[in-house]
Image: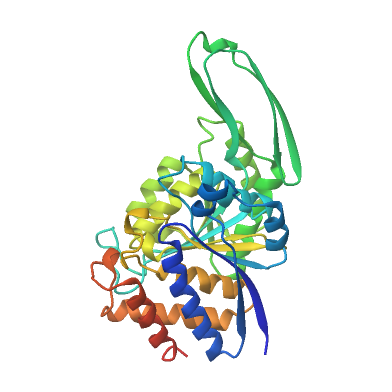
């Protein structure tokens, strides 16, 4: 029997609760399809950080690199300053393993009430592909009390950026700056991934958005790269928007989209809008993919510490992220089995968690999906 080794990071807040149900569902699905999953659990998160000061160790990076897939819960804790855990754990893993593809399906399931009046499952069904390692999340910046000249080195996988910034023009005032950067290589590989995804899944349109009219250098490069790559795919329609216009059309006419490829910052914002129009963060899965290396699969939602331990969190985003993990491991049939089981549970509507307007618990939802698995063959 084939065994797949998967690294497992439950994380913080509701992360352990929702991924527990995800593990249960994946293990039952693997039994039905005659393979095994070996979970290698890592104690990475806020509790260990508060206890030891450790985020992700070099030894852990080395070990995680041995796996094709990481199953991740959530990160974030109100006891820790914002940004410490996010940059030191989540973004660090994405950067270290060059997980440059953030794949987020936006799908309104039958039986779920979406946020848009008059729009149903046929209208809300597209994929957002977000660049995941560049743009405004470089982590390079500062808050300064006096102007001067800052020199710094921005290190990321495959390239090093040397910058000298003269800040004397701001005058005698406290100020802050943040550096975003983009490489032609980084933009091209994610845009090409989007067109290949559209081609392989018979989706006829790829859209993008930027703010090149106001931020002409970084997003000018993005827009030019999109034009270059799109010419290589004459059978796929391409559309360019400014980001404010794209968000408007996502609300007014989501049915016009099939694949949307976005720079990192805008992709982060737009995919939460996508989660809202598909019925909420509780059913929004995602994948952080390196096509040639270690990839990570996680629900879009955060750690939601206010719901920790209350048996209220919806585990379906984690379950569907697990299905994406199995698909990545080459188990497309099993992934489809899980998706059909989720579809059945949502369509029938007998089990609904708080976010879906019901009172069912986290484990109860996991139980419902497991029961539906045997009926979804």
Question: In which image quadrant can residue 347 be found?
Answer: bottom left
Q: Position of residue 176 (x, y in %)?
A: 51, 23
* As drawn, 138 above or below 19: above
How many numbered discs, if any?
Answer: 0
Q: Position of residue 143 (x, y in %)?
A: 52, 24
The answer to whether residue 113 of the structure is visible from this angle is no
Question: In which image quadrant can residue 111 be found?
Answer: bottom left
Instruction: Tell me the quadrant of the picture where the N terminus can be found.
Output: bottom right
User: Residue, x 69% and y 41% (percent of image)?
Assistant: 183
In the displayed structure, does residue 15 sit left or right of residue 108? right
In the displayed structure, does residue 83 sit left or right of residue 108? right
Query: Coloring scheme of the render?
Result: rainbow
* As drawn, 88 above or below 343: above
In the displayed structure, does residue 8 sit left or right of residue 317? right
* As drawn, 311 above or below 222: below
Q: Position of residue 118 (x, y in %)?
A: 25, 62
Question: In which image quadrant can residue 182 be found?
Answer: top right
- Between 205 and 164, the one lying in front of the other is 164
- Between 332 and 28, the one lying in front of the other is 28
User: Residue, x 37% and y 55% (percent of image)?
Assistant: 304
Residue lying furthest top: 172
């Amino acid at each position: 029997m084939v065994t797949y080794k998967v690294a497992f990071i439950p994380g913080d807040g509701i992360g352990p609760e929702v991924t527990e149900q995800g593990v249960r569902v994946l293990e039952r699905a693997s039994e039905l399809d005659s393979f095994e999953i070996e979970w290698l659990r890592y104690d990475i998160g806020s509790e260990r950080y508060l206890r030891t000061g450790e985020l992700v160790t070099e030894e852990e990076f080395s070990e995680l690199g041995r796996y094709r897939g990481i199953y991740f819960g959530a990160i974030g804790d109100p006891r820790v300053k914002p940004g410490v855990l996010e940059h030191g754990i989540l973004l660090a893993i994405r950067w270290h393993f060059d997980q440059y593809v953030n794949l987020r399906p936006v799908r309104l399931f039958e039986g779920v009430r979406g946020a848009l009046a008059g729009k149903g499952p046929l209208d809300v069904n597209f994929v957002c592909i977000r660049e995941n390692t560049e743009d405004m999340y470089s982590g390079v910046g500062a808050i300064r009390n006096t102007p001067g000249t800052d020199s710094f080195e921005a290190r990321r996988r495959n390239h090093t950026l040397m910058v000298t910034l003269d800040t004397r023009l701001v005058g005698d005032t406290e100020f802050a700056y943040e550096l975003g950067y983009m490489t032609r290589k980084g933009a091209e590989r994610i845009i090409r991934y989007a067109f290949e995804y559209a081609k392989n899944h018979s989706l006829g349109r790829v859209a993008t958005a930027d703010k090149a009219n106001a931020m002409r250098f970084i997003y000018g490069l993005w827009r030019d790269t999109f034009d270059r790559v799109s010419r290589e795919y004459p059978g796929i329609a391409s559309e360019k928007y400014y980001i404010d216009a794209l968000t408007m059309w996502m609300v007014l006419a989501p049915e016009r989209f099939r694949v949307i490829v976005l720079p990192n910052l805008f992709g982060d914002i737009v995919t939460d809008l996508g989660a809202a129009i598909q019925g909420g963060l509780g059913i929004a899965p995602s994948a952080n993919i390196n096509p040639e290396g270690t990839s990570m699969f996680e629900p879009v939602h955060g750690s939601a510490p206010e719901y920790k331990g209350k048996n209220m969190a919806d585990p379906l985003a984690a379950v569907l992220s697990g299905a994406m993990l199995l698909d990545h491991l080459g188990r497309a049939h099993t992934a489809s089995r899980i998706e059909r089981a989720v579809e059945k549970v949502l369509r029938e509507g007998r089990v609904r968690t708080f976010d879906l307007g019901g009172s069912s618990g986290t484990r109860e939802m996991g139980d419902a999906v497991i029961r539906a698995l045997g009926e979804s063959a």
